[in-house]
Amino acid sequence: MSKICQLTGKRPVSGNNVSHSNRKTKRRFLPNLHKKRFFIPEKGEWVTLKVSAHAMRSIDKLGVYEYLKQQKKKGFDVGIDL
């Protein structure tokens, strides 16, 4: 299962762990992803998406249908035919 947000495109990035003695070792920063079901009242159906916490906040502000339309226009696979 890939760790990529379906709506924002957030994905793991790499960086360094830095110890007290300033030694650096590689690490990955993973996005805060959740598998969540959203009900789209305009379509009358449920859709399951793997989204980041940032995307969930945006959905709360705009509404799920409006946000999905915006992201579809930007080229993201929103998992539903709008």
Image (cartoon, rainbow, N blue to C red):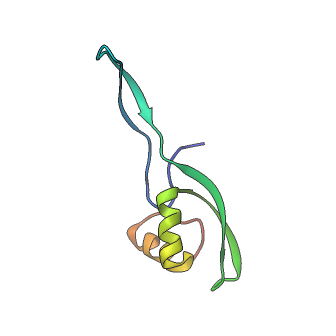
The extreme right residue here reads: 45
Locate residue 59, reporting x and y percent. Answer: 52, 71
The answer to whether 49 appears left or right of 70 in the picture is right
Residue depicted at x 48% and y 75%:
61
Residue depicted at x 65% and y 60%:
36
Q: Judge whether 23 appears above or below 16 on screen.
A: above
Task: Tell me where residue 35 sits by quadrant.
Answer: bottom right
Q: Is residue 29 visible?
A: yes
The extreme left residue here reads: 22
Quadrant location of the N terminus in the rendered image:
top right
Closer to the camera in the image, 70 or 57: 57
The extreme bottom residue here reads: 42
The answer to whether 61 appears left or right of 13 in the picture is right
Q: Is residue 77 visible?
A: no
Q: Judge whether 18 appears above or below 47 on screen.
A: above
Closer to the camera in the image, 62 or 71: 62
Residue depicted at x 43% and y 32%:
28
Quadrant location of the C terminus in the rendered image:
bottom right
Locate residue 23, reporting x and y percent. Answer: 31, 15
The extreme front residue here reads: 20
Locate residue 11, reporting x and y percent. Answer: 44, 46
Residue depicted at x 46% and y 71%:
72
Q: Judge whether 21 appears above or below 4 on screen.
A: above
